[in-house]
Amino acid sequence: MLALGLMSGTSMDGIDLALVETDGEDRLAFGPTGFAPFGEPDRALLRRALAEAATLDDRDARPGALAEAEARITALHAAAVRDFAAAHAGAARGLAVIGFHGQTVLHRPERRLTVQIGDGAALARSSGVAVVADLRAADVAAGGQGAPLVPVFHRALARSAGLAAPAAILNLGGVGNITFLPERGDPLAFDTGPGNALIDDLMLERTGAAFDGEGAAAGQGRIDAAIVADLMRHPYFDARPPKSLDRNAWSRAAVAPLSTADAAATLTDFTAASVARALEHLPATPAVLVVCGGGARNPVLMAGLARRLPCRVTGAAALGWDGDAIEAQAFAYLAVRACRGLPITFPGTTGVGAPLTGGVLHPGPARHGH
């Protein structure tokens, strides 16, 4: 089945797109990928929506900026799909389903509440293709964490690459999440802590830049080890997995007195320290940790991981993977699994009681009177 995955992550930089031909199990054939960046007005609207979502107790409510943000997110995804399909008309011929993550604005699984804005039915109408959306909700309603969702794809990806177990795959988007692949059995996965979100927000506040490109600011700064140690006292790090986080679980207040370079260096080391602490929760030390997501492009963060971790650290590109597209590829894969009624979450990945499928299917418009 040919699927297009769409991912707009917690870093709020834009939409990743990826075509995958898959059976939702072990068969994977990767097609072209793309990226549709958000403009600054879009990011500003999403930041307003995030702030207003903090008080939600109804996942269907769209007060204030949330309604405007949902309409905008849907329109941006529709335009991205249209442009991608035009640019890759041959590869996209026969597209059967779109996996639509939407934009997470609130994640509170302890309250059985997770909110991803984006109108799947509207996207199906505009694209003319069936859409699977709202992939986290069923898991959260069943008492799971609703995150991370990517581990079942990580397992298929590792198998296709012949990656020897035990191994781990770390995604560093706005929030960090890790998948541990044992020699036998289902994966274990959980959110490690902050990924790039704190660093991105610092750079936006101090410089107006959306992120610390190439780790340039952090590379010029000095790590405040006392602040890192204090941040690592957060009870999240001692909690046993499965566990997951909201993007705004941490504040940047601790680094407020520091220069921009020192603050960036300190927050970058905090991310590396949180990953090192996460490895202590694994049943075995992985032989290799493969890093994907935006954090893999930050050499200062990658060096921090290599310094702190007890295993080999490598970027996804070293395995021939498109590290920036892995989450979009995963949502294509998950959409196919959802269509086939296969589980997408597991006790070891989200803490749900039993393997569970998920997602809401929005059929494409009927054609030729059928």
Image (cartoon, rainbow, N blue to C red):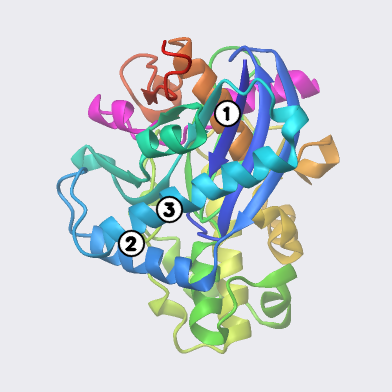
Q: Locate the N terminus by quadrant.
A: top right
The type of residue carrying mark 2 is Leu
Tell which circle, 3 or 1, labels the residue nearer the N-terminal end: 3
Say if 178 sits above or below 186 in the image.
below
In this rendering, position of residue 338 left or right of residue 60: right
Dot 2 alpha-carbon crowd within 10 angstroms: few under 14, some 14 to 19, many 20 or more = many
Q: Which residue is mark 1?
A: 332
Look at the numbered discs 3 and 1 and tell me whether their residues touch, using CB distance below 8 Å: no
In this rendering, position of residue 74 left or right of residue 29: left
The type of residue carrying mark 1 is Ala
Q: Looking at the image, which is closer to me, 29 or 196?
A: 29
For the residues labelled 3 and 2, the Cα–Cα distance comes to: 13 Å
Badge 1 element: helix
Q: Residue at x 19, y 42 (%)?
A: 111
Say if 58 sits above or below 149 in the image.
below
Q: Which residue is mark 3?
A: 73
Stretch of the chain drawn in magenta? 135-163
Report if residue 152 lies within the magenta region: yes
Total marks drawn? 3
Tell which circle, 2 or 1, labels the residue nearer the N-terminal end: 2
- Mark number for residue 231? none
Badge 3 element: helix
Point out residue 258 in the picture as x, y percentages from the top left corner: 52, 87
Q: Which residue is mark 2?
A: 50
Badge 2 element: helix
Give the foreground label among 3 and 2. Answer: 3
The type of residue carrying mark 3 is Ile
